[in-house]
């Protein structure tokens, strides 16, 4: 009786310890997101809010509105976090490209934690350089467009340093969430910024319906479509292609282990939400700069670039779709190497039925991955281009669809899976500890 009570108490204590750690991680995530949301309401010193509001009213529905969605409203308020995580994402894209092209960076990836730390350090330096270029360009634009009370050298210096510091702070905050919280920090920051804009988008849609700008039937159709998109995204993201794996009979000492069968799960969309974020970031950076600088009367070329790269334009749709497809294949190639998988299966005495181990297995897995990526890239492209389709067919903006819903749903699913993994790992650790103690007592 006493032994059973002690075991139950130990198990409850282990579960309580696991819940305490998870609770502390979740509280850290909530605190970090709260700090981020507060930062989006702190304006850059010297900005004229009335002029800024007028500029955004003129560019409503353009590229600035899309950039503002990714910044969580920070750009509209021209806060200290106006650049958001765009410089860090751009730096990550460049580093991934360098890793694919240059053997030096490929060797760093193979060095384990030490190599990853060096790549992270280079990414931080590149983020600083990109933030410096974008921050100084934005500061000069604010001064030239009359958005500052006293445009001059002091304003340019203060605004540039403020914007650069805000971007570096966003990078640091995202890394802290990843290390000390739950889930991917950068994705959660983008997630919180998008979710913060949902109430305003809903209010705008209901107000348009009340004033008669949108038919009530169209509004109901958009609501049903939003629900269908969420269900479709969840269905595809949970979809898997399972490759059957057989293990040969093996012998260890005098014991013979029978042949076993397992499977290799491959997701339909292995790149997740990364292609949509990367493609949006590459389009937002030049398009937003062209839109800001193109406001001058003597900048006709930039005005044309900003117009061509605006949402809904054919070139924007074509480049956005091409970017999503490219990054779907690119990111999948970085994160999943069929040759390494085939070599690991061969070392473990495993094989795919009907396929010879080694190179043929690698070729077979690579073919499966390629076909899955084609469908995954098509699905991401279809969901992300939905707002443009709504504008074309119904003449109304569908702000609760496309990239925003894709990012929100995928990040939420990843966050919940991370929470479940933390719970399972704490329970597994206590189970192993309990098993070792029991076997130790029996041996004695």
Image (tube, rainbow, N blue to C red):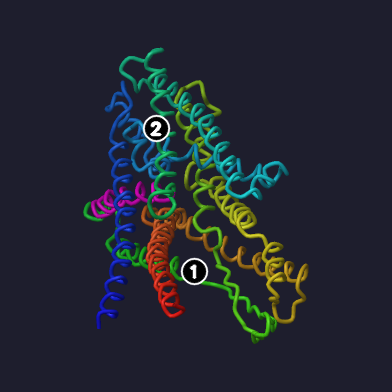
Tag 2 residue: 166
Distance, label 1 to label 2, CA atoms, is 36 Å
- Residue 167: x percent and y percent? 43, 34
Which region shows up in magenta? 187-207
> Residue 414 occupies which quadrant of the picture?
bottom left
Judged from the image, the secondary structure of the residue bearing numbered disc 2 is helix
Q: Residues within 10 Å of mark 2 (few under 14, many from 20)?
A: many
- Residue 308: x percent and y percent? 53, 39
- Decide which of 176, 285 is in the foreground and name it: 176
Q: Is 23 rendered above or below residue 292?
A: below
Q: Which mark is residue 301?
A: none
Q: Which mark is residue 236?
A: 1
Magenta part, dominant SS: helix
Q: Does residue 412 show up magenta in the picture?
A: no
Q: Is residue 26 left or right of residue 171?
A: left
- Decide which of 46, 123 is in the foreground and name it: 123
- Quadrant location of the N terminus in the rendered image: bottom left
- Residue 68: x percent and y percent? 38, 40
Q: Is 125 rendered above or below residue 226?
A: above
- Residue 316: x percent and y percent? 54, 45
Q: Residue at x 69, y 84 (%)?
A: 249
- Quadrant location of the C terminus in the rendered image: bottom left
Q: Is residue 3 left or right of residue 161?
A: left
Q: Residue at x 30, y 70 (%)?
A: 10
Q: Are marks 1 and 2 in contact (CB under 8 Å)?
A: no
Judged from the image, the secondary structure of the residue bearing numbered disc 1 is helix
């Amino acid at each position: 009786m006493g032994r059973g009570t002690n075991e139950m108490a130990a198990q409850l204590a282990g579960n309580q310890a696991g819940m305490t750690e998870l609770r502390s991680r979740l509280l850290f995530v909530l605190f970090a997101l709260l700090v981020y949301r507060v930062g989006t309401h702190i304006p850059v010193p010297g900005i004229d809010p009335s002029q800024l509001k007028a500029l955004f009213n003129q560019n409503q529905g353009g590229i600035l509105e899309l950039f503002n969605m990714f910044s969580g409203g920070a750009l509209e308020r021209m806060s200290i976090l106006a650049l958001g995580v765009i410089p860090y994402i751009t730096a990550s894209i460049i580093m991934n490209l360098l890793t694919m092209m240059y053997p030096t960076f490929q060797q760093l990836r193979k060095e384990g934690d030490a190599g990853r730390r060096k790549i992270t350090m280079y990414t931080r330096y590149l983020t600083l350089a990109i933030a410096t270029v974008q921050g100084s360009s934005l500061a000069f634009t604010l001064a030239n467009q009359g958005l500052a009370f006293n445009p001059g050298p002091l304003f340019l210096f203060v605004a540039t340093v403020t914007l650069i510091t805000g971007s570096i702070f966003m990078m640091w905050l995202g890394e802290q969430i990843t290390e000390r919280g739950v889930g991917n920090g950068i994705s959660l920051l983008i997630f919180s910024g998008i979710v913060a804009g949902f109430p305003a988008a809903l209010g705008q849609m209901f107000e348009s319906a009340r004033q008669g700008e949108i038919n009530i039937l169209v509004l109901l159709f958009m609501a049903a479509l939003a629900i269908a998109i969420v269900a479709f995204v969840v269905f595809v993201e949970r979809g898997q292609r399972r490759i059957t794996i057989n293990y040969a009979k093996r012998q260890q000492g005098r014991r013979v282990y029978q042949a076993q069968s397992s499977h290799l799960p491959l997701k339909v969309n292995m790149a997740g939400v990364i292609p949509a974020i990367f493609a949006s970031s590459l389009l937002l950076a030049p398009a937003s700069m062209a839109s800001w600088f193109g406001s001058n009367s003597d900048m006709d070329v930039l005005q044309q670039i900003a117009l061509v790269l605006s949402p809904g334009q054919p070139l924007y749709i074509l480049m956005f779709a091409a970017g999503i497809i490219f990054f779907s294949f690119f990111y999948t190639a970085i994160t999943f190497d069929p040759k390494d998988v085939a070599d690991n299966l061969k070392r473990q005495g495993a094989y795919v039925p009907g396929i010879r181990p080694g190179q043929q297995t690698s070729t077979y897995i690579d073919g499966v991955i390629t076909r899955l990526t084609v469908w995954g890239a098509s699905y991401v492209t279809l969901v992300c281009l939905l707002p443009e389709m709504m504008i074309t067919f119904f003449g109304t903006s569908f702000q609760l669809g496309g990239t925003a819903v894709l990012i929100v749903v995928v990040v939420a699913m990843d966050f919940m899976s991370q929470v479940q993994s933390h719970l399972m790992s704490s329970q597994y650790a206590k189970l192993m500890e309990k098993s070792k103690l029991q076997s130790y007592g029996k041996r004695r």
